[in-house]
Image (cartoon, rainbow, N blue to C red):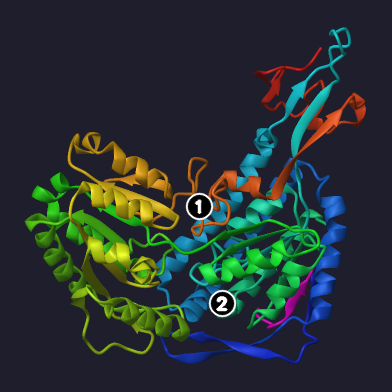
Amino acid sequence: MITGKNYIGKNLSAVGRKTYRTFNPQLNIENDFVFTEATNEEIESAVALASEAFKVYRTISGAEKANFLNAIADEIVALDNELLTVYCSESGLPRGRAEGEMGRTIGQLRAFAQLLLEGSWVEATIDTAQPNRMPAPKPDLRKMLIPIGPVVVFGASNFPLAYSTAGGDTASALAAGCPVIVKSHPMHSGTGELVASAVIKAVQKTGMPNGVFSNLNSTGIEVGQHLVKHPGVKAVGFTGSIAGGKALFDLAAKRLEPIPVFAEMGSINPVVILPGALQNSYADLAKTYAVSITLGTGQFCTNPGLLLGIKGEDLTTFVRHLSNEILKIDASCMLHPNIARVYEANKQKAIVQQGVTVVADADVDVKPNFARQAVATVEGTVFLENPTLHQEVFGPYSLVVQCENIKQLEQIISALEGQLTGTLIAADEEANKYPEIILALQNRVGRLIFNGVPTGVEVCPSMTHGGPYPASTDSRFTAVGTNSIKRWVRPFSYQDWPDALLPDALKNENPLGISRMVNNKPTISKIV
């Protein structure tokens, strides 16, 4: 049941006067539910509860936290049709997408639960004492990862489930031992409240401390700003625009105690098509990339917004086929009227740049909030000289850059800002001829795809979803996969500490049975 209220820990609250509704972009009308924005007092209460909860939650065993995460997953499953219906009404996305994202959200929670049950993620490292070492004795030192404190998670507009209320940021922070305060995205507050209710039910069923989770509504930037500046908050997770992520990053850096902001931001995900790949497969590539560019109405952070190739007849043929294929695809609904307006504005800004030629533009009547897909092309020299063409157009749009030669192609790649992904399309053995292109891509992206498409992010330990700035604010970390837990922890060492007072992960007996590094050797054995 949607109340429109904020969850301050386990309690519902709506003392503020500022209210709003979500919007159904498919029907082009407001939804019925009215939501109340969190007040400063409610924000203060949520952070105070989170700080108190942290004192207890940080000491809870991995098995208990795993039970909690699995309980959240179970409660989301129980929401079933109600959640899917609200999701679709607030996003304009089809039910199949809702079902897939719900499955991914549940899968992420269970993956972190499994990580906790296994336990080795804490990276326990032990160097035993050498009291007789000369010229000075060596102390006993034991290190592991510990949680950093309450985390604020900003819901993402384009993933109402997987990157929002109980998405990857929340799941990984809770797994790490950090309470979470979600700043719900105003475009899908109903979806957020339903998921928040599932989390709170799991809190109560598993006996977690009150305040380990809160969910706050807002329409503007004030609630988020208040949270980021609050001294009780110790880290931030964000998925969204470069402007939004950078604003939060700068705000956190100005605090008396600066905190990390792990922001996954914009990306145009360059796709390099080497000459040999075009000779016999341009038609198949065109079909594949027409689908990828328009998938989810182009509203993926991994959308292929930039295609790079060597000027010539084969590239010209590919562009012609791509143009034909993308125009065969029906226009689809964007997430919100504001996003649709920004897409059209940014697309127009890009295609009116000098030297840009539009080769495909769906010049047809579409319903309100539906996007007209487009492909444009430009010479490599023009692209290099115009930074405007390097910027993301969030939606079903891609720019084909026709490079003079391999040297210019490498130059263009090196001139790009940091990206989430890069893709190399090559014929058999062709990639071996261009190591400089591979190295240039590696220097600009977090994940490199071979003969595929960048859309689609597998949730697994080997996934890196991040990249050099501004793809993310810290390229050493991933926002997807179980390794994303490392954003919310810090290394901590115990020196000459009594064994009985050590955490189980560092005790001589190794009661958890986890893999540890003992005197530079990996082992699960106890220390005798």
Query: Is residue 357 shown left or right of residue 126?
Result: left
Q: Secondary structure at mark 1?
A: loop
Overall secondary structure of the magenta section = loop
Vertical side of 264 occupied by 501: above or below: above
What residue did someone put label 2 on?
188
Residue at the image point whose x is 13% and y is 55% from the top: 282
* Residue 8 part of the magenta segment: yes
Q: Is residue 169 left or right of residue 403?
A: right
- Which residue in the protein does label 1 denote? 466
Give the farthest residue toward the left: 313
Q: CA distance from mark 1 to mark 2?
A: 24 Å
Locate residue 303, reporting x and y percent.
37, 62
Residue occupying the point 19% across, 34% down: 429
Q: What residue is drawn where x is 45% and y is 61%? A: 100
**Does the magenta portion include 515?**
no
Q: Position of residue 527 (x, y in %)?
A: 79, 16
Q: Secondary structure at mark 2?
A: helix
Amino acid on which disc 1 is placed? Gly
Q: Which residues are magenta?
A: 1-9
Between 253 and 266, the residue placed more toward the observer is 253
Q: Is residue 316 left or right of residue 64?
A: left
Name the residue located 36 percent from the left edge and 51 percent from the top edge.
414
Q: Given the image, on which type of amino acid does mark 2 rest?
A: His
Structural crowding at the residue carrying mark 1, measured as other residues with C-alpha within 10 Å and reported as few (<14), some (14–19) or many (≥20): many
